[in-house]
Amino acid sequence: MTSDDTTDDVTGDVAGDDEPAAPASADPKQAYRDAYDQWQKHLSGVHSLLLEGNRLPPEQIKGLLNREARAKERYDAARRRLLGIDE
């Protein structure tokens, strides 16, 4: 971890710690599972903030929401590939 990295107190993630999206040549089912698991992990952090009342500094809230949004985009893309409707 570098001095530029920040730790997310809700999920324990380091900013920029997202796993890269699976390559297009990977098994679509496994890519879907991986993307879903990552999205659920980040969504859990958002729920912790919004539903359980955990407090975070504004810059960490922004990072948490951005990570969840990117994970959701990767999940949606993997889901479209699995359904055969890749854009």
Image (tube, rainbow, N blue to C red):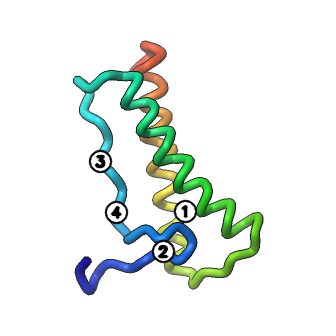
Q: Is residue 40 above or below residue 6?
A: above
User: What is the number of the mark on residue 17?
Assistant: 4
Residue at far top of view: 84
Residue at the (49%, 43%) spot, across then down? 37
Q: Is residue 22 above or below residue 43?
A: above
Q: Name the residue under label 2.
A: 8
> Which comes before the other along the chain, label 2 or label 1?
2
Mark 4 nearby-residue class (10 Å; few <14, some 14–19, many ≥20): few
SS label for mark 1: helix
| Nearer to us: label 4 or label 1 | 4
The N terminus sits in image quarter: bottom left
Residue 3 figure quarter: bottom left
> Which comes before the other along the chain, label 3 or label 1?
3
15 left or right of 41 in image = left
The C terminus sits in image quarter: top left
Mark 2 nearby-residue class (10 Å; few <14, some 14–19, many ≥20): some
Q: Name the residue under label 3.
A: 20
Identify which residue, 35 or 58, lies in the foreground. Answer: 35
Q: Is residue 64 above or below residue 81?
A: below
> Of the residues shown, which amino acid type is indicated by label 2?
Asp
3 left or right of 34 in image = left
Q: Are marks 3 and 4 in contact (CB under 8 Å)?
A: no
Residue 47's x, y, as percent?
68, 60
Residue 74 figure quarter: top left
> Which comes before the other along the chain, label 3 or label 2?
2
Q: Name the residue under label 1.
A: 65
Q: Do the residues labelled 3 and 1 touch (CB within 8 Å)?
A: no
> Of the residues shown, which amino acid type is indicated by label 4?
Asp
